[in-house]
Image (tube, rainbow, N blue to C red):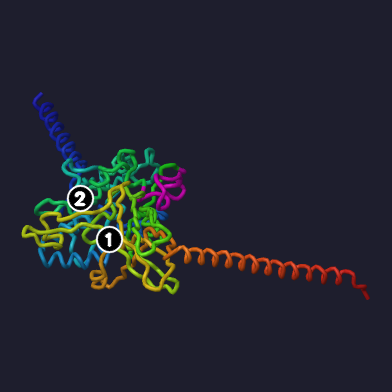
Amino acid sequence: MRKSRFIALALVAVVTLVVGAASAVAEPVPVEPGNAKPANFEPASACGCHSALVEQWQKSLHAQALTDPIYVAKLEEAKKANPALGPFCNKCHGPAATMTGEAGAAELSVGVADGITCAWCHQVTGNDGKEIANTSQLVLPDGTRRAQIKDPQAPHKAAYSEFHESPEFCGGCHNVNHPINGMHLEATYSEYIESPWAKEGVTCQDCHMSLAPGTIGPYEGVAAAGGPKRGNIYSMSFVGANVELGDAAAATALLKSAAELDVEVPEIVGGGADVKVTITNVGAGHHLPTGLTEVREMWLEVSLIDGSGNKTPVGERRFGTILQDDEGNAPVELWEATKIKSDDRIPARESVTETYRVTLPDGVEAATLEAALRYRSTDDELPKKAGTKNPVTDMAVQTTQVYANEAAQQAASKQDVNQGESRDSMNLAIALVGLAVIAGIIVLVVVKSRKPRA
């Protein structure tokens, strides 16, 4: 009896230990040092069945999150100001490296070096239940790959994850609060949540992981080579606004789909007239610009261009955030900021109108009024320090002809008519020459066919 009781108690103890161990393994953990090992994060190169998706990811800033030269240069500035900022910034840029304790090391394990890599994202299970910011995702590094596929058919452990379809998945990294005073440094997720897009159910993934910039939602395709065709496939391109370091064509197309311009100006400006330029955020589910908005540069530039190509500035407005410190100094660096001095960015589906006075330069009777909304990732100082380029992208451009008086307008109209007639005459002449050549070829063929044979 005593022996049976001892065996029963022993079995209970063993079961308790096994269940306890299993629970410990199955418990998601935050992105903190020591919560994973390098072996928990296979490199993207190991995801061979998903080669098409891996190729998309390789062009993204997620793949370059730890090696982006502008980020590296800015991180060095931050660490000089406060060494604690290194681990703080690397938490989002290298979550796997943070969890393995390798963040900031000269050499990283192969999978960890991939930055924001497949194995990290697809082992995320949710958020920590606190504010969605500062890498608040929880990770279960048990090798199970989680995604939006409800019936995964994979040779590895896989599971459906509703969280991977939610904006909160992205928000954990795309909301960044100051590590000391808690002020918003990046608020892309918060901007989205307050936008009409969120109310309509359009998610971050629907825009930044769609088949092409400017299109919305998943597309039909396969998740892996040889896999079944599905209607809810997302691209791993994570297209953003970085033209130089990301997929240039996709980033340019995304920027061009974000805003529209409307220009109101009389054709005859005489001694001066008002021009109204309205900018509407039509395509972004967040403010324009977004992200580190004291660094990003978006501006409206209105100019007159005469017939010789000479450009005369009419007006300019820059959009962004200006940070200040407790003493009122502005602008200041991210780590010095305690409050936002000003924020004049354009929320989703909202408009801003600028009015300028336009006057033609002396001696110019006709010109093109050009309104252009332009963007670049930062000013030129940081890219120069980082040894990379900093291209300017025209997000939207509108042009209209303006004249000093009616006579100039009529002269231009007559010239356009003459040029049109001239083009028509030239086109007719080219067509006649072409017909003559064809007719000549036909005659030669006929003559040759009638020639008597020897």
165 or 379, nearer to the observer? 379
Q: Which is in the foreground here, disc 1 or disc 2?
A: 1
Look at 26% across and 70% down and name the residue there.
380
Q: Secondary structure at mark 2?
A: loop
Residue 216 in the image: x percent, y percent?
40, 46
Within the image, what quadrant is residue 342 found in?
bottom left
Q: Which residue is mark 2?
A: 135
Within the image, what quadrant is residue 268 found in?
bottom left
Q: Which residue is mark 1?
A: 317
Look at 47% across and 48% down and name the residue there.
226
Within the image, what quadrant is residue 305 found in?
bottom left
Span colored in magenta: 207-229
Look at 78% across and 70% down and name the residue there.
441
Say if 395 sits above or below 444 in the image.
above
Query: Does the rendering let one see residue 190?
Result: yes
Say if 233 sits above or below 436 in the image.
above
Q: Secondary structure at mark 1?
A: strand
- Magenta span: chief secondary structure: loop
